[in-house]
Amino acid sequence: MRFLDIIAAPAPHGGMTAKTDIVITPVNGKADLKAFVELPWAIYADDPNWVAPLKGEVYALLTPGKNPFFEHAKVQPMLARRGGRVVGRISAHIDLLALKQPPEQGMGPGTGNWGMLEAFEEEVAAALIAAAEDWLRAQGMHRALGPFSLSVWDEPGQLISGHDHPPTVMMGHQRAEYALWIENAGYLPIKQMMTWEVDIADGFNKLVNRIVASGEKNDRIKIRPVNKSRFAEEAALIMGILNDAWSKNWGFVPLTDSEIAHVGKKLKPIVYEDLIRIAEYDGEPVAFMITLPDLNEKLIDYNGSLFPFNWAKLLWWLRKPQVRTMRVPLMGVVQDLQGSRLASQLAFMMIEFIRRDAVARYGTTRGEIGWILDDNQGMNSIGEILDGRVNKTYQVYEKDL
C-alpha cells in the first residue's frame, strides 16, 4: 500500500495558528521525506541524551514494501512549515487490524492514531495535531489515540519521565514539554508504559535464587537457548507464543506473518543465542525471553549514519559486544499458564540464566525490562522482586474526535 494521495485536511482556522503563518502539507516526494526524517537532528541538537536513529531504519519504517505495517495500514506523514522552513512533523495513521480489536483493549472500531510528532514550538505542535485529527476524521475515525510511531510494536507513548539518561535500543526519547502540548490539545492520559532498571552484576536476592534452584531440579522444565542456525523457525515459534501471551493486553494488535518475518530479519544481526531463551514444559514451548545488547551505547556516537566507516566499527563490535546494558524488549508465557506459580518460575529462570551469560560473556552490569503496561501486575511484580526501579515512563493519550 502506498502513501495516500490526498491533501491533508486543514487544521482549524485554515490550518493556521493565531499568527496565521504555519502551513501543514502532506509529505510528497523524496525532498519532503528527507525533511521529515532529518528534522529530529535539529530538534535535539542540544540534547545529550537523544540517540540519533540510523536514518536508513527510519526511511524503511516509512516506506511501503520495506515495512509490512503498510500491508494493513493507511499512513499520512505531514510537515509544518513557517516561512518556507520546516518546523515540525507528524504522522497520522490507521491500523486496519487495530480497528478489529475489542474496544475494551484500547483500540477498536473508529480509533485512529498519530505519532512521530516533533516541533520547535507548541503552536506548531497544536497545528500538526489538529491536521492529523482532521485527516483521521476524513477517514471516518471518531477517536484519536497516540502517540504511536508507527504501531504499538514500534515506539508507543510520550516519554514523561526519564529524560535524564539515554534510551536503550528500540526505545523512544522525546522532549519533555511535548506531554503538556499534547494535553493542551485536549488529550487525556489513558495508559502508561514503564521500563524497569535492574542491577545484575552481583546476582539477585535469596528469594529469586530459591525459585530458580527449585526449577533447575524439575525435570519437566527445560530452558534452552535459541538456535540461530534455524532462526526463521525459532522467530516464528517465539512470535506465536507472543501473539498468544499478549492477546488480552491493552493495545494488542496481532503480528502478521509478514511482520514476524520482518522482525526476525531486523533483529538477527543483534541476536545472540545465549541471550534469547525458550522455556519448555513437558517438551512443549510455553514461554520465551528476548534480550538485546544495548546498541544505543554505540549508536549515540554515530549521528544516525553508518558511513563512511561506522559500519565497519559496528560490525566489529557486533562480533562480541561488551555492553553495560541489556534490554529485555519482549517476554511472554502462554495464556494457559498465566497467573500460575509455574509462569513466575519460568520467568525468573530465564532471567537468571540470561543474566549469568550477560555478565560473564558481555560484561553487562545493568538490565532494562520493558516496556511494561502499568496494569500488568505480573511483570511489575517481577520488577519489584528483582529489586528494580522504574527508570522511564511513557504516556499514551486519547481524545474523542
Image: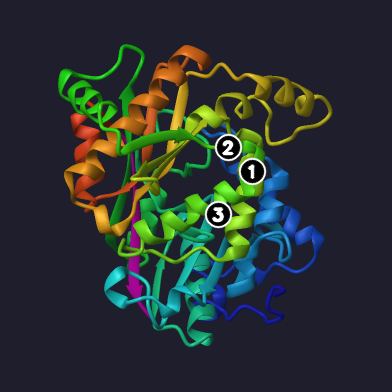
- Residue 62: quadrant of the picture: bottom right
Residue where numbered disc 2 is placed: 227
Using residue 398 as the reference point, say whether residue 317 is left or right of it. right
Residue where numbered disc 1 is placed: 230
Query: Which numbered disc, 1 or 3, marks the residue closer to the eye?
Result: 1
Quarter containing the N terminus: bottom right
Q: Nearer the viewer, residue 35 or 261?
A: 261
Residue appearing at x 45%, y 34% in the figure: 224
Using residue 354 as the reference point, say whether residue 237 is left or right of it. right
Quarter containing the C terminus: bottom left
Q: Nearer the viewer, residue 256 or 343?
A: 343
Residue where numbered disc 3 is placed: 236
The secondary structure that most of the magenta stretch takes on is strand
The x and y percentages for residue 47 are 52, 32
Q: Is residue 270 above or below residue 170?
A: above
Q: Is residue 5 visible?
A: yes
Total residue callouts? 3
Name the residue type under label 3.
Ala
Give the CA distance from mark 1 to mark 2.
Answer: 6 Å
Q: Are marks 1 and 2 in contact (CB under 8 Å)?
A: yes
Judging from the image, what secondary structure is the residue with disc 1 in? helix
Q: Nearer the viewer, residue 175 or 378?
A: 378
Name the residue type under label 1.
Arg
Residue appearing at x 72%, y 54% in the figure: 35
| The magenta segment | 391-401
Q: Nearer the viewer, residue 10 or 110?
A: 110
Q: Are marks 1 and 3 in contact (CB under 8 Å)?
A: no
The x and y percentages for residue 395 are 33, 53
Give the CA distance from mark 2 to mark 3.
Answer: 12 Å
